[in-house]
Image (spheres, rainbow, N blue to C red):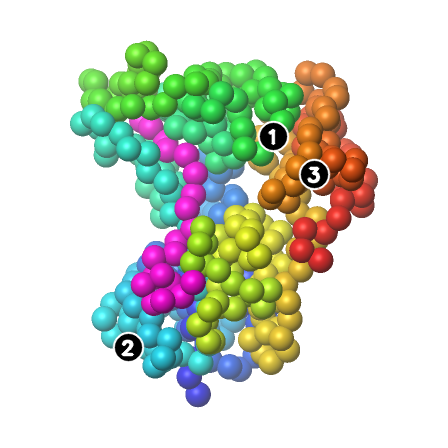
Amino acid sequence: MEPIVVVGTGLAGFNLVKELRKLDKETPVVMLTSDDGRNYSKPMLSNGFAKNKSADDLAMAQPEQVEASLNVEVRSGVTVTAIDSAKKEILVDGAPLKYSKLVLGLGADVFRPPLEGDAQELVYSVNDLVDYGTFRNAIADKKKIFILGGGLIGCEFANDLAGADFDVEVVEPLGRCLPTLLPEDASHAVQKGLESIGVKFHFGPLAKAVHREGDGVRVELSDGSSVQADIVLSAVGLRPRIALAKEAGVNVNRGIVVDRHLKTSADDIYALGDCAEVEGYVLPYILPLMASSRALAKTLTGEPTEVTFGVMPVTIKTPACPTVVCPAPHGTEGAWICEGEGLDIKGLFRDKTGLLCGYALTGAACAEKQALNKELPALLP
C-alpha cells in the first residue's frame, strides 16, 4: 500500500496528521521537510524573545518523538524537486517516492525586498524554527534592531524584541501600523502602545539600502534619511509557495488553488495552510488551518468533507496594545466606523446595507470579541 505523503512539517502538516490519526491509526504516512523536522508552533516565534526562549525551548517534539507518537515516518533535511501526478510519485532529492495521496503543506516564503548595499548578510528573516535560532544567535550581543515592515509580523516582533530590552526601530512605507488589516484609529492605537515601550517608527519611506558601518549597519531610506543599527530583521510579508505545484501543472493563483475539499486540479493531490487558496481566500492564520486539517483528515480517510470557515478572528500578539481583528471578506464594499480613544478602539466594518462584516478591536475593546463573533456571518459556511 502506497503511503499518504505530506510535504511540510509546519502547523499544517502536523495538525493534519494528528487529525488523521484520530480516524485512522494504520495507513502509512510519510512526512517530508527541508528543515530539521522538529514540531513547533510558528506563532510562538514572534513572542519568544521577551520570554527568553531558545529555539530548543520552542520545539515541542523531535522528529523521532513525532514518529513514535503518530506512527509516521519523518524525513527531514530533504527537498521535493518534482511531482508526477500521472505516475503518482514525487522526486525527493532525485529519488522517486510513490504516494496514494499527496498533501502539500508547503507554507509560505518571506518576501525579500530588493535592497542595495554591502550588508545583505546582516538582513535576517524569521520564517521557521531554524531561522529563529539563527536570528537569536545573531542578536546575542546586539542592542539595536531595525525592522523592515510594520504589518502583523513586524509589529509582533517589534513588541517582542522591545520587551527583551532591545532598541527597536521600524520602517513602514504604507504610513501606519498594520495598514492592510486595521482602520486608521486602530492602527494609531497599536502605534501608541508600541511607542510606549520604546519602539520608534518611520512611516512613509522604503528601506533602499543596507550598508556596513563599523560593527553594524546603516539603513538608507528612500526619503534620504538613514538609521544606524546593529542588525536588520525583514518582516515585509509572506508569499505562498506555489512553484512546485505550478511546475507539476497544478492550477495556481496567489496560492495553490483548491476546492472546498482542499483538492487541487490534479487527482489525489491536496493542499492546505499558508500555501493554499480556498475559494479565493489565502488565509495564513491558525483558525483556518485547524478547520482545514479537520476536514481534510476526514476526506483522506474516505469521508469527503468540505471545509467550512466560520468567524475567523486573528489575535495579534502585541501586548503593549492587545489587538484582535476579523477582516471583512475580500471584495466587500463598505466602511469602517470607529469609536473609543487612546489604546481602546472599537472599529466595525459594515457593508452598504449596514450588515456587520468585520471588526478591529484594540486595548480594552478586545473584551467585545465574543459578542461580535456572534453577530458576524461565517466566512465560508
Identify residue type, mark 3: Gly
Q: At which x and y percent is residue 265?
A: 46, 69
Instruction: Identify the residue at image location x=43%, y=29%.
Output: 149
Which disc is residue 358 wearing? 3
Residue 59 seen in the figure: no
Where disc 2 sits, the SS reads: strand
| Residue 14 placement, left or right of 336 | left
Report the residue marked by disc 2.
96
Q: In the image, which residues are magenta?
A: 230-251
In the rendered image of this protein, does residue 227 appear above or below residue 348? above
Between the C-alphas of marks 1 and 3, the distance is 10 Å
Answer whether labels 1 and 3 touch (C-beta < 8 Å). no
Instruction: Identify the residue at image location x=65%, y=41%.
Output: 332
Identify residue type, mark 1: Leu
Q: At which x and y percent is residue 323?
A: 64, 32
Q: Earlier in the sequence, mark 2 or mark 3?
A: 2
Between the C-alphas of marks 2 and 3, the distance is 46 Å
At label 2, counting other C-alpha atoms closer than 10 Å, the crowd grade (few under 14, some 14-19, many 20 or more) is some
Task: Looking at the picture, tell me which residue is in the foreground, 192 or 334.
Answer: 334
Between the C-alphas of marks 2 and 1, the distance is 46 Å
Q: At which x and y percent is residue 334?
A: 69, 34
| Residue 84 placement, left or right of 200 | left
Which disc is residue 182 wearing? 1
